[in-house]
Image (spheres, grey):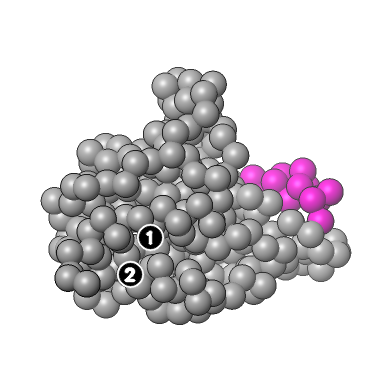
Amino acid sequence: MPTQVGTRAAEARLLITLPAPETPRERVAMFLDMDGVLAPLAPTPDSVVADPRRTAVIARLVKALEGRVAIVSGRTLDEIDRIADHASPAAAGVHGLVRRRANGEETTFTPSPGVARAAEAVIAFAAERPGLLVEQKGVAVGIHYRQSPQYEAEVLALADDLAATHDLSIQPGVLVVELKTPGADKGAAVTAFMAEPPFRGARPIMLGDDLTDEHGFLAAEALGGYGVLVGPPRATAARYGLSGPDAVLDWLDSVSAAFDTEPA
């Protein structure tokens, strides 16, 4: 289960402040979560919009790393492209259930029939509780309770019940929980990218902020790389930490500069 991701070693990392990562000099591949990492968290998913600086930083990084960059998010590919302004050709959406390779080819898991049935129950549930937001993604359905945190216990109980009833996976996040088609997570997406060009043979670095990213941290570690936790310290499989999206963009700019070999 996602809430069990991690080990005693990972939990021990909470006892110290995670150091900021050094600027890598070896051949690396970068995997970047969107909300809370590339973009600040916002009250609703739609209120996160494209930002010129973010777009420019991603574009420079893609060029500097010769395409070895992928946004790995819980959002759909359309949402990733909207917020990143199409700066990253490679991306994985809905926690790895949808993936676009660097060459533009897309693969999507077949939606579980249980997702549609769960969505009906979620919509009816949210209609009676002001502030809850339902996000349908085809292969998953999410319940956002950022604007009404008083419903957290009810939302989580509903998710547990629907997951068991309809054979779905539960993916908790920051004031959101998703019911999704089983079979993929961010770690599987990172692993799949690393088996393909242009990522193959590089050292993977995964940047994420919440429990949905722990699978990505573990996959990066298993493949010789590491994770970077963005935001407050907590039990994590990540080796390093950055304070927030502004620090992320600053660090990614330093990575781009280190790999930019074009003459001035």
Whole-percent x, y for residue 128 in the image = 86, 64
Whether 106 is among the magenta residues is no
Tell whether label 1 touches label 2 (CB within 8 Å).
Answer: yes
Residue 255 lies in quadrant: bottom left
How many neighbours does mark 2 have within 10 angstroms: few (below 14), some (14-19), or many (20 or more)? some
Q: Quadrant of the C terminus?
A: bottom left
Taking depth in this image into account, of 152 and 69 the one nearest to the observer is 69
The residue that label 1 is drawn on is 253
Type of residue at label 1? Asp
Per the image, the residue denoted by label 2 is: 60
SS state under label 1? helix
User: On the rendered structure, is 29 left or right of 124?
Assistant: left
Q: Nearer the viewer, residue 243 or 182?
A: 243
Looking at the image, can residue 117 be seen? no
Question: Which residue is found at the position 27% from the left and 46% from the top?
Answer: 24
Horizontal side of residue 50 vs 259, given as left or right: right
The answer to whether residue 119 is left or right of residue 247 is right
> Alpha-carbon neighbours of circle 1 within 10 Å: few (<14), some, or many (≥20)?
some
Where residue 65 sits, quadrant-wise, is bottom left
Q: Residue furthest front?
A: 264
Quadrant for residue 228, please give it: top left
In this rendering, the answer to whether 32 lies above or below 52 is above
State the extent of the magenta-drawn residues as a range.
Answer: 148-161
Spatial CA span between label 2 and label 1: 8 Å
In magenta segment, residue 158: yes
Q: Amino acid at mark 2?
A: Arg
Residue 152 position, x and y percent, is 76, 47
